[in-house]
């Protein structure tokens, strides 16, 4: 993406984010007397500088508009005022949306250069009784994280790389919305792309351009959906295929058929854990034999807020926690306190918790019986050697990266070693 600079009057130091899909412009601090363009720019710049993943423009009663930022997984209100005239039009123009349509949800995107960083904004509009609500996801092109820096344990990373090296099979990344599944898939693609393999990625939309990866953007409105793309991808002679998500029966079946054709397929699915992911696929109507034959492994993941290093405290854990996790005598755990650095939250940044679960022959036999998620969960929790998300998250608590309270908040510690259901 090339930077395209525009000349502007000295009285207007703020640059307008690009209105075209692939333009990039310098964003600067808005002038005190703000136009609607400057007002929107100010909100976008603030979101970038405060490490937000998304910015929400939410219309309310009596013409008020609230702006909230999602930072480290939680929403924080940052601004409420009478809605500036023209803000909806400005966001729609930037995102190349239809200005006259205020009753139908729309998607758009634009780019901007903020503090020397190329930021992509993915925009979604949503009609409400008080006006259109907008959610803008922020994608920093510099945040493509190598796989060895995602937070996998050494044993977990070894298992992931073993899965990535398989000649065929389906590898699923699972977790709730916002748990970083796309980040993990991109890290895997980026590493495989450095090898001698042909890699094809089917995405909606393409999040980041990747070297040595053939990326194709799905367009359901024109009939080019995941299932159609998968039926054609073999003509590209791929070794590895990435599919954005297995959200419906047609896509899931096409992905497994691609596996049977002799390819390694990477994909994701919204589910809390491996048991729920397998249960969802079977519930869609996938043939149990097809799934048992094709599924190679599941990577569970969750994102935990990282305790703020500027204000964290070390405290003695409760006796029940020490006994449950067999902590060493005198071992202390981090506690969130809150300071100016973390805006009083006690947390700054995020860290992943993972479980890497290869499919065993015992699990393949179980899948043939169409088990319920509860039976699959009992299977997983009955394996003491499992490199699980729960102990992985607890290891990060012991290391002082996050707190036990955060582990509980995210539901990662609801079960502990020895529990089966």
Image (spheres, rainbow, N blue to C red):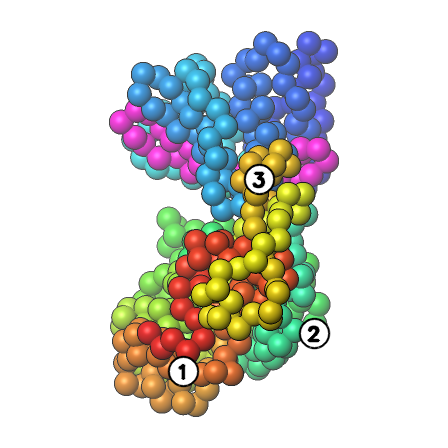
Where residue 194 appears, as percent x and y from the top left, is 71, 67
- Residue 98 falls in which quadrant of the image? top left
Looking at the picture, does residue 76 appear above or below residue 335?
above
Q: Which residue is mark 3?
A: 338
* Residue under the image location 62 percent in, 49 percent down: 313
Q: Is residue 57 left or right of residue 395?
A: left
Q: Which residues are magenta?
A: 113-135
**Which SS does the magenta portion mostly show?**
strand
Estimate how packed mark 2 is, as few (under 14), some (14 to 19) or many (20 or more) residues with alpha carbons within 10 Å. Answer: few
Mark 3 or 2, which is nearer the eye? Answer: 3
Where residue 85 appears, as percent x and y from the top left, is 43, 14
* Residue under the image location 37 percent in, 48 percent down: 221
Q: Which residue is mark 1?
A: 382
* Residue 116 seen in the figure: yes
* Residue under the image location 53 percent in, 64 percent down: 393
- Residue 22 falls in which quadrant of the image? top right
Mark 1, secondary structure of its residue: loop
Looking at the picture, does residue 4 appear above or below residue 254?
above
- In contact (CB < 8 Å): disc 3 and disc 1: no
Mark 3 or 1, which is nearer the eye? Answer: 3
Name the foreground residue: 53 vs 113. Answer: 53
Mark 3, secondary structure of its residue: loop
Marks 3 and 2, how far apart at CA: 48 Å
Where residue 343 appears, as percent x and y from the top left, is 57, 35
Q: Which residue is mark 2?
A: 196
Marks 2 and 1, how far apart at CA: 39 Å
Looking at the picture, does residue 355 appear above or below residue 386?
above
């Amino acid at each position: 993406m090339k930077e395209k600079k525009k000349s502007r009057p000295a009285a207007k130091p703020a640059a307008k984010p690009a209105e075209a899909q692939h333009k990039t412009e310098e964003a600067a601090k808005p002038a005190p007397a703000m136009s609607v363009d400057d007002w929107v720019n100010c909100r976008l710049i603030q979101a970038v500088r405060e490490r937000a993943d998304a910015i929400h423009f939410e219309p309310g009663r009596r013409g008020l508009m609230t702006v909230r930022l999602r930072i480290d997984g939680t929403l924080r209100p940052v601004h409420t005022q009478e809605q500036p005239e023209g803000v909806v039009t400005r966001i729609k123009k930037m995102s190349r949306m239809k200005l006259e349509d205020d009753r139908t949800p729309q998607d758009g995107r634009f780019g901007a250069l903020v503090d020397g960083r190329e930021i992509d904004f993915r925009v979604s509009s949503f009609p409400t009784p008080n006006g259109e609500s907008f959610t803008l996801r922020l994608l920093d092109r510099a945040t493509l994280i190598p796989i060895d820096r995602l937070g996998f344990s050494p044993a977990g990373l070894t298992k992931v790389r073993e899965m990535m090296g398989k000649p065929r099979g389906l590898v699923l990344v699972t977790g709730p919305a916002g748990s970083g599944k796309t980040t993990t898939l991109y890290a895997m693609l980026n590493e495989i792309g450095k090898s001698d393999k042909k890699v094809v990625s089917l995405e909606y939309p393409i999040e980041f351009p990747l070297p040595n990866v053939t990326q194709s953007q799905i367009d359901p409105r024109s009939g080019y959906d995941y299932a159609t793309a998968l039926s054609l991808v073999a003509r590209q002679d791929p070794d590895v295929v990435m599919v954005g998500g297995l959200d419906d029966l047609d896509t899931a079946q096409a992905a497994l058929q691609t596996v049977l054709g002799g390819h390694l397929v990477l994909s994701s699915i919204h589910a809390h854990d491996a048991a729920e992911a397998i249960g969802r696929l079977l519930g869609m109507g996938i043939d149990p034999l097809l799934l048992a034959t094709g599924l190679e492994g599941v990577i569970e993941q969750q994102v935990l807020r990282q305790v703020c290093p500027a204000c964290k405290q070390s405290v003695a854990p409760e006796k029940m926690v020490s006994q449950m996790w067999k902590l060493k005598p005198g071992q202390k755990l981090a506690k969130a306190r809150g300071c100016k650095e973390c805006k009083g939250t006690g947390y700054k940044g995020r860290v992943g918790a993972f479980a890497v679960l290869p499919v065993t022959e015992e699990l393949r036999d179980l899948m043939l019986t169409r088990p319920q998620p509860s039976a699959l969960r009992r299977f997983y929790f009955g394996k003491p050697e499992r490199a699980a998300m729960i102990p992985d998250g607890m290891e990060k608590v012991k290391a002082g990266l996050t707190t036990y309270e955060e582990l509980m908040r995210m539901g990662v510690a609801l079960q502990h070693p020895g529990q089966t259901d």
